[in-house]
Image (cartoon, rainbow, N blue to C red):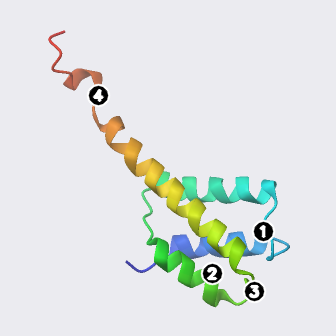
Amino acid sequence: MPLTNNVIIKLNEITTMVEDKSKLSEIEIDEIKKIFKTLVENNERYDIDEIEFWFKNEGSWTTKEPRIRIVNISSYIQDKYQQTAHLRVISDDDCSCGN
């Protein structure tokens, strides 16, 4: 699945936000988490391999560790959202518990 324009825009935001591309600060990590959380909450889906490929080829991310950290964050956020999303689909009205 190719990256959507919205995802690419957010990846560019991350690139602009991170000052030292060789390491991520805790504040930057928190902001990156928020960006990916917003994406998945807005039903944007992305392929983790495509995210990794994008950062590798973007040009300014020469150190591998921060790229891998961002990819891991994107994967974690997407997986977490997908695991909990199906729980939100069931409402109390649909309960077959006899009440």
| Residue identified by numbered label 3 | 60
Q: Which numbered disc, 3 or 1, marks the residue that appears first in the sequence?
A: 1
Q: Quadrant of residue 93?
A: top left
Name the residue located 45 percent from the left edge and 69 percent from the top edge.
46
| Residue identified by numbered label 1 | 17
Task: State how far apart marks 3 and 4 are (Cα).
Answer: 46 Å
- Residue 47, position as x, y percentages in the image: 44, 72
Q: Which numbered disc, 1 or 4, marks the residue that appears first in the sequence?
A: 1
- Which numbered disc covers residue 91? 4
Q: Quadrant of residue 85?
A: top left
Q: How many marks?
A: 4
Quadrant position of the N terminus in the picture: bottom left
The front one of 30 and 43 is: 30
- Which numbered disc covers residue 55? 2
The front one of 82 and 4 is: 82
Task: State how far apart marks 1 and 2 are (Cα).
Answer: 14 Å
Name the residue located 78 percent from the left edge and 65 percent from the top edge.
24
Task: State how far apart marks 2 and 4 are (Cα).
Answer: 39 Å
Above or below, 46 relative to 93: below
Q: Which amino acid type corresponds to the residue marked 2 in the rendered image?
A: Phe
Name the residue located 64 percent from the left edge and 55 percent from the top edge.
33
Give the mark toward the camera: 3 or 4.
3
Task: State how far apart marks 2 and 3 are (Cα).
Answer: 8 Å
